[in-house]
Image: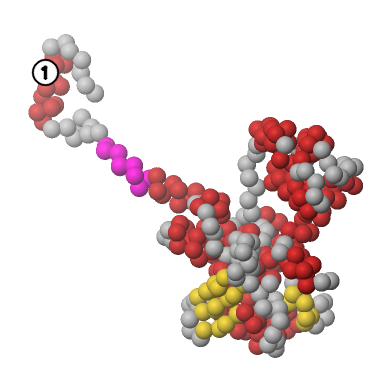
């Protein structure tokens, strides 16, 4: 591959390339569409899968088709008014609540970490994988990392500041469209400390370079390659299931990010602080990740509702009021009871 081809390939994220390739394959092989496509065929394709695919998935398919046509020098049919009108109609007909991953709560985080520690004490064969899992869990939560960010960490790009925290550099991330890279900090904490967990993992694994979080086979052998982002959901659900947390299948890689955002919101962080720490560029993205528990919501409402005043009974009423009520009763007027 020439230098030009190499740089052109690097201009697109690997995940984006895979998603686009899968979308084109679906259009051609599943729906038997022809490329280059017409606006009518793209509109028909959208209508055919409107009831079975999420709106965001359909938008991804459109983006892939648009990219293919532009790359091959053809007119882009996805920009036609017919396609945009069909997409608008699908949005109106199939609007549904957004499915969100269940956020991890702090007590659940503590419970899973305690379970990992206890299991490692009982079975020494679990010590290495459990130290890795604990470090992944704590760094993923306290940094609010996505699955791909967590699995792309390299030892060369993580600096330990004793008693302060971790300094983490990512060459690129989802929000870093220009591939400028960004530095993240993760503080040392009095409990559930990501720094301590990271140090214990490196010491046990005896690794000094390359991927931080690596595969470990069934015999306890540490591999050289990093854990794949697509395995994070299964990994997290397995941890929760083994720790005895109910509805473990409702958690996903986004549970780490949503859990941290909800914790920060409940702890008094303002939206600007949270956006800067996590790396969100717009308020809408941040708000989708924050949850307010029903208990917190109820407490806020009750705080603004004045306490009701108990009406005095007849016996508690002042004497002057009782005399007035009695005199009215003798005169044949209505008696207030």
Residue at (53, 50) in percent of width and height:
284
In the image, residue 120 above or below residue 112: below
Q: Is residue 133 magenta?
A: no
Is residue 160 among what the camera can see? yes
In the image, residue 189 above or below residue 53: below
The residue lying toward the viewer, choosing from 158 and 302, is 158
Image side of residue 312 versus residue 330, left or right: right
**Quadrant of the frame with the N terminus:** bottom right
Residue 171, image quadrant = bottom right
Q: Residue 325 appears at what percent x and percent y?
A: 15, 22
Per the image, label 1 sits on a secondary structure element best described as helix
Find the residue positioned furthest to the top: 332
Image side of residue 109 versus residue 235, left or right: left
Q: Mark 1 points at which residue?
A: 327
Residue at (68, 72) in percent of width and height:
152
Residue at (54, 64) in percent of width and height:
278
Is residue 256 among what the camera can see? no
The residue lying toward the viewer, choosing from 331 and 241, is 241
The residue lying toward the viewer, choosing from 126 and 271, is 271
**Quadrant of the frame with the C terminus:** top left
Q: Residue 329 appears at what percent x and percent y?
A: 16, 16
Prevalent SS, magenta region: loop
Which residues lie in the magenta part? 302-310
Residue at (71, 78) in percent of width and height:
211
In the image, residue 46 above or below residue 223: above
Residue 154, image quadrant = bottom right
The residue lying toward the viewer, choosing from 24 and 102, is 24
Question: Label 1: few (<14), some or many (≥20) within 10 Å?
Answer: few
Residue 166, image quadrant = bottom right
């Amino acid at each position: 591959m020439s230098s030009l081809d190499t740089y052109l390939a690097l201009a697109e994220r690997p995940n984006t390339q895979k998603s686009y390739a899968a979308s084109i394959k679906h259009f051609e092989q599943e729906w038997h569409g022809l490329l280059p496509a017409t606006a009518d065929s793209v509109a028909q394709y959208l209508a055919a899968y409107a009831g079975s695919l999420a709106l965001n998935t359909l938008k991804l398919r459109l983006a892939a088709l648009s990219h293919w046509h532009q790359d091959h020098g053809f007119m882009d049919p996805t920009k036609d008014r017919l396609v945009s009108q069909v997409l608008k109609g699908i949005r109106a007909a199939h609007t549904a609540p957004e499915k969100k991953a269940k956020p991890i709560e702090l007590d659940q985080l503590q419970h899973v970490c305690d379970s990992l520690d206890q299991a490692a004490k009982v079975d020494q064969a679990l010590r290495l994988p459990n130290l890795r899992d604990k470090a992944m869990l704590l760094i993923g939560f306290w940094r609010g990392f996505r699955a791909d960010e967590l699995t792309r960490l390299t030892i060369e790009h993580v600096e330990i500041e004793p008693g302060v925290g971790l300094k983490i550099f990512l060459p690129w991330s989802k929000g870093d469209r220009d591939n400028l890279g960004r530095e993240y900090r993760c503080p040392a904490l009095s409990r559930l400390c990501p720094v301590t967990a990271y140090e214990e993992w490196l010491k046990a694994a005896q690794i000094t370079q390359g991927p931080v979080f690596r595969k470990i086979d069934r015999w306890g052998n540490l591999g050289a390659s990093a854990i794949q982002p697509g395995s994070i959901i299964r990994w997290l659900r397995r941890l929760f299931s083994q720790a005895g947390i109910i509805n473990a299948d409702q958690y996903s890689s986004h549970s780490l990010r949503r859990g941290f955002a909800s914790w920060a919101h409940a702890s008094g962080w303002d939206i600007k602080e949270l956006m800067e720490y996590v790396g969100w560029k717009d308020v809408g993205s941040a708000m989708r990740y924050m949850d307010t528990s029903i208990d917190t919501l109820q407490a806020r409402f009750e705080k603004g509702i004045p306490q009701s005043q108990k009406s005095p009974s007849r016996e508690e009423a002042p004497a002057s009021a009782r005399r007035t009520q009695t005199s009215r009763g003798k005169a044949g007027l209505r008696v207030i009871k």
